[in-house]
Image (cartoon, rainbow, N blue to C red):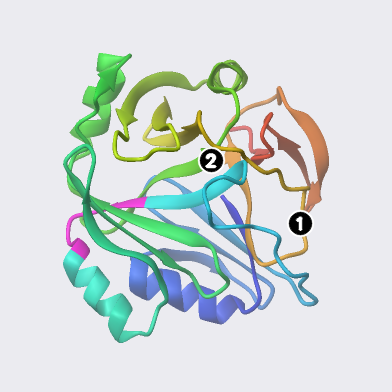
Amino acid sequence: MLLNVTDIARSVEFYRRQLGAVVVAQREDAAELDLVTARLLLSRVDAPAESTWIGDDLQRGFRHVGFKVSDLDARVAALHEAGVPFHLEPINAEGGVRITFFFDPDGTLLELVEGPLQYHEVYDRDAVEQDWALGDPERPRFDHVAGTVDDLEATREHYAKLGYLHMSGIHQPSDDRGFEINFLRSGDSSLEIFTYDRAEKSTRDPQFDAPGFVAVAFDADTAPGARVGTVSGRDVFADPDGLHYVLVPA
């Protein structure tokens, strides 16, 4: 996963202290962090543009990065003590989990999830069992990247070409926008797919010079999406809704 940041040392300290990240490599202009089931690549932007990301969940493309934790309330207390801005204070959510949302130093929206998610719909039982078998993490574990899409079937077809299967779903009956969540799974992490059947959605042009989320990294040789740019020498591709990704073949 790739993020643009304005201060490498500040972001490394944030992810190390607040999310248990382990530093793999660090320079003045870049860093690589271990998040148990993923690597986070930080890249410094020296003349950042103003981000066009909107945190309303109705903007198609990237929404947030999610982590599994076993000590949500303790971590929330530490985040509050550090003055970290919150998007949503802890709540009990659909699926029997406890969640909260907050921002990293450059405005990337992050989620903590405590507890095994009890899916309302199961489409691949083996994948769900493998998800649950990961258990409670000793330190925060990367779990998912979330994105809003316009056409679930088109999204499923796109990511099937990258090795993702349709694992499960969660209903949101209290949301009058027709909000549903589906989970596409590969390995030890998911793509959390938001759909809104009764709400108008907006789009966002590619933006690689602003702080915040840049792209997901997939272990694949070919991309089913269109190439939309280059970041740190890597070609960047987009799914049908503008979620960006890069290929990092094994």
Residue 154: x, y in percent?
61, 18
Q: Position of residue 64 (x, y in %)?
A: 49, 52
> What residue type is disc 1 on?
Phe
Write down the residue under mark 1.
Answer: 208
Q: x, y (%) of residue 66?
A: 39, 50
Nearer to me, 9 or 3: 3
Q: Residue 147: which disc?
A: 2
Please name the amino acid that badge 2 sits on.
Gly
Does label 2 or label 1 sit earlier along the sequence? Answer: 2
Residue lying at 58% horizontally and 35% vertically, measured from the top left:
218
Q: Position of residue 5 (x, y in %)?
A: 63, 70
Q: Is residue 186 visible?
A: no
Binning the other alpha carbons within 10 Å of mark 2 as few (below 14), some (14 to 19) or many (20 upward) gives many
Quadrant the C terminus occupies: top right
- Image: 105 above or below 216: below
Taking 127 as reference, is 64 above or below it?
A: below
Q: Which residues are magenta?
A: 67-72
Would you say 249 lies left or right of 191 here?
right
- Specify the label residue 158 is tagged with: none
Residue found at x 35% / y 84%? 82
CA gap, disc 2 and disc 1:
17 Å
Residue at 48% across / 60% down in the picture? 109
Asked which quadrant contains residue 155, the reply is top right
In this rendering, does residue 190 appear at all? yes
Image quadrant of residue 83?
bottom left
The kind of secondary structure element at disc 2 is strand
Say which element carries label 1: loop
Cβ atoms at labels 2 and 1 below 8 Å apart: no
Label 1 neighbour load within 10 Å: few <14, some 14-19, many 20+: many
Q: Magenta stretch containing residue 96, yes or no? A: no
Marker count (numbered): 2
Front of the two marks 2 and 1: 2
